[in-house]
Image (spheres, grey):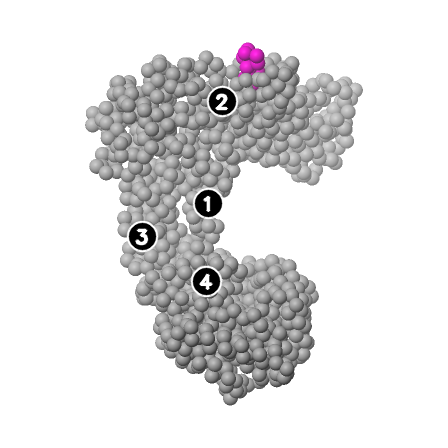
Amino acid sequence: MIKFFLMVNKQGQTRLSKYYEHVEINKRTLLETEVIKSCLSRSSEKCSFIEYKDFKLIYRQYAALFIVVGVNDTENEMAIYEFIHNFVEVLDEYFSRVAFWWYVTVKGENRHCREDKHQDLTCSPIGRLPAPAGTCGSCEVTAWCVTSEREPARRCRDGRLRI
Amino acid sequence: MPAVSKGDGMRGLAVFISDIRNCKSKEAEIKRINKELANIRSKFKGDKALDGYSKKKYVCKLLFIFLLGHDIDFGHMEAVNLLSSNKYTEKQIGYLFISVLVNSNSELIRLINNAIKNDLASRNPTFMCLALHCIANVGSREMGEAFAADIPRILVAGDSMDSVKQSAALCLLRLYKASPDLVPMGEWTARVVHLLNDQHMGVVTAAVSLITCLCKKNPDDFKTCISLAVSRLSRIVSSASTDLQDYTYYFVPAPWLSVKLLRLLQCYPPPEDAAVKGRLVECLETVLNKAQEPPKSKKVQHSNAKNAILFETISLIIHYDSEPNLLVRACNQLGQFLQHRETNLRYLALESMCTLASSEFSHEAVKTHIDTVINALKTERDVSVRQRAADLLYAMCDRSNAKQIVSEMLRYLETADYAIREEIVLKVAILAEKYAVDYSWYVDTILNLIRIAGDYVSEEVWYRVLQIVTNRDDVQGYAAKTVFEALQAPACHENMVKVGGYILGEFGNLIAGDPRSSPPVQFSLLHSKFHLCSVATRALLLSTYIKFINLFPETKATIQGVLRAGSQLRNADVELQQRAVEYLTLSSVASTDVLATVLEEMPPFPERESSILAKLKRKKGPGAGSALDDGRRDPSSNDINGGVEPTPSTVSTPSPSADLLGLRAAPPPAAPPAPSGAGNLLVDVFSDGPAAQPGLGPSAEEAFLSELEPPAPESPMALLADPAPAADPGPEDIGPPIPEADELLNKFVCKNNGVLFENQLLQIGVKSEFRQNLGRMYLFYGNKTSVQFQNFSPTVVHPGDLQTQLAVQTKRVAAQVDGGAQVQQVLNIECLRDFLTPPLLSVRFRYGGAPQSLTLKLPVTINKFFQPTEMAAQDFFQRWKQLSLPQQEAQKIFKANHPMDAEVTKAKLLGFGSALLDNVDPNPENFVGAGIIQTKALQVGCLLRLEPNAQAQMYRLTLRTSKEPVSRHLCELLAQQF
């Protein structure tokens, strides 16, 4: 079972976090800091799974962005690992050149963003999408993130995400 | 679903966002935002009613501002208004705002719920989905209460669209996880299972997630899902790589759905239906076969998805643990991954193999990979992979490869990461103990552990080696020699000094014959370490010294000199000072005989669960249990290495020697020999103290640890160091039981509560309860006088070899009992094996200056551990016949001492502990009973028959048990009752 989903930049700032179990806000900050630290300190030859307290972290790196998923120990690591990639692909198809855009967003433009608002899907890259299309899409992606149990859908032929 | 066109305006929003992005400073940004907020506020407050488009635009801006990190305190109402719009985009923005920003503001929640309700009832699939997503996103209890009943209906309704069903399933799952009590089970559950057959893969995926979660609570309600899941899985696995279109991921059909289905099947045992099982096995084989086929794509995504299914398949195979063929194939597959160039695969293969190792079918197959795993431990660059390799080595270890694995782990320990050193140390210690064939190897291994990683050797580890050495005389000499050699290293770890100190103190005499390790050499070697050690170790060493005085009288002068030195006698540390003072006095006051008794070798420790194992379990959490418990596979190991067998007793160690000096009782330093002979039990360091309750598990272990924490309780001579109040005098100290003791005891054979003893001074009440082989007894001592009792000390004594049969643990009672007051003492009793004589209770106190003493028989008789057994007449006679050997039967014909009343007899027999069986004996006047005597070591089945003869006022009592003494003893006990 997925416990939380984090997107973190190389500077260690949380860009998106979503919890599927209740965690107190102040504990989240602590948890995120530690999680990020353990991911950032790893070189590429190390495996993508980290045991952390009573759960496992599974992470992937895309340019300057880390996606970290915390799961309990019954979860299939490989399935989650590939799920992250599928997630990125979906975002990429939906928003096009997501990776680049993330890079820009994360590197350049979030300088004023207040840290304490990361507790939800709020300060997400999706939320910062400038175009209306993005805002519309966010609802669908939000729902998709929230439920987490969904089989990551591929794009339909009509070019929209299947929800 | 309405298309979202990019041309759908909101230019104002785009302009605002680009303004923000162009801001050069935080101040400028705030300024721009404040301007916008003022603008929006005036629009919302304005007279002109806003159209849907404007509302949407402003709500979007507010949302954006919120996402930038600014608080928003208005606009909620407008967002709620958007919910009732008929335009998809407006409704959607409304829901987005609400999902992100609304907390349980009661007034708004009512409006929101109303809007959601309307949308759920709207039959417009898009609106229904939006509403369901909102419920899932917010997921609050209020929303759950409002909608939990509606969602199952939508989920199983025949006319719901696929997308709605899917959203409903996920929404329900979310609500169920948040508050399970809100989701009503009912008729819909059966229909949910059938969603596994749905045409739409999205619906199936969502349904599997939901069912997997629900079936954990009510497995039987969802049992039908097994066959549906199997057939679904079979269709996916056998489909061509393009059949599933949207759900094919890099040529792998529905990988995540497959994983979920396999996971669902792991909630149940293997299918009972042979056809279903056959089909499933076929699926599993197909997956294993596919892993061997050349990949359909070179992309890493393809192989990742395929491997995800493969690993889940292997988990299922391990879960079933019934198909040797599949288990071995799985093991071979994992073996290939062990050498894969992808670190992730190596990691996962090691992890899965660890569980495979505990299956009897694949244990051997796993063992063939030992070299690869050892190599991984040495060369793997990632610590988490090395950790997995160490886990796997631990799991695959058995008698055949223990030496190799232990030596490899020891070698690894020298370079191991600090983070996992302690765990490796524990594992090595456990393996060495569990698979030790000769104990010299064990001692070598542990000493090596201390040498290599002394800092990580926890107390449990070195306590354990002492326990084992003390309990096995065949290894003591070797141990003494080895520690002596180890101590000669110029720098040795403090733990080594502790072990060395203890072992030489106990068994140094075994190597004293060799001039190289003569007593003075031993002493000076130990003493050369003394000044570098911590207080606890020094305290231990002082105890070693006093033991030396006993072992080697020739060292007496030297050691007394050391003790007398100012640095000891006036040591700032009170523990050290006290030990020095007491030991010095002891050595000069006591005669050789007394010394020899007081400082005798420690008695063997009671066998108990290895505290190391408990510690490792604690470290690893409950999940690690399976791999650790595999010792049960090899029951013979327990005989040789008794420590593995959990032993729930902390038996008070019998005291072969009384504390003739009572040093503790009297104020140091000038302790005159206490004439009272109030003995102190030689409580052993590991199981001392009343706090150590019988029982397993961390709590007991922790109690045991905390017990050890006070400074320097490691003293081998707990009699001096341990303030244990459990003052058990040796058997020779107490007087014979009072004449009435037997009679008093008989009163309690058939009852558990009552007054055990009473005279003018004292009343002793008993309240006890017994379950299986354990019992707890409360003794109430009432002072009937108006004068305080002093030095009040009730103790329990085991005459003869009772101590091996019955463990009685007492708790401290206050030494003073005020006039008219009552004190309570709790006794924890464990029956280890059958016993004949009851323990003695000796009560001593001073009343008005005059010592009083009293010895009673504690009302603990073997029948207290009776467990009644109901059985039919047929069974009874069959067993009766089985126990037909003459020595198994005991019979007594005796005259009735009491009026012969059937009801009273019945009550007595029930009180005695056996079950009364009706309709067994053809004569209804007769009584027939059956029961099992529960002891720790064995169970004794017991059948009895009592035939009253009213005319002759006689009884005939017949007992048959599987043990001769038990038959006779029970017969005697019971005969006295009638």
Mark 3 lies on a secondary structure that is: loop
* B922 w.r.t. B233: above or below: above
At label 3, the amino acid type is Asp
Q: What label does residue B632 carry, if any?
A: 1
Question: Which residue occupies 60% across, 69% down?
Answer: B135
Q: Are marks 4 and 3 on the same chain?
A: no
- Horizontal side, residue B122 vs residue B312: left or right: right
Mark 4 lies on a secondary structure that is: strand
Residue of label 3: B417
Foreground residue among B854 and B246: B854
Q: Residues within 10 Å of mark 1 (few under 14, many from 20)?
A: few
Question: Which residue occupies 40% across, 59% down?
Answer: A34
Classify residue B430 by image quadrant: top left
What separation in Å lies between label 2 and label 1 (alpha carbons)? 37 Å
What separation in Å lies between label 2 and label 3 (alpha carbons)? 48 Å
Residues drawn in magenta? B843-854
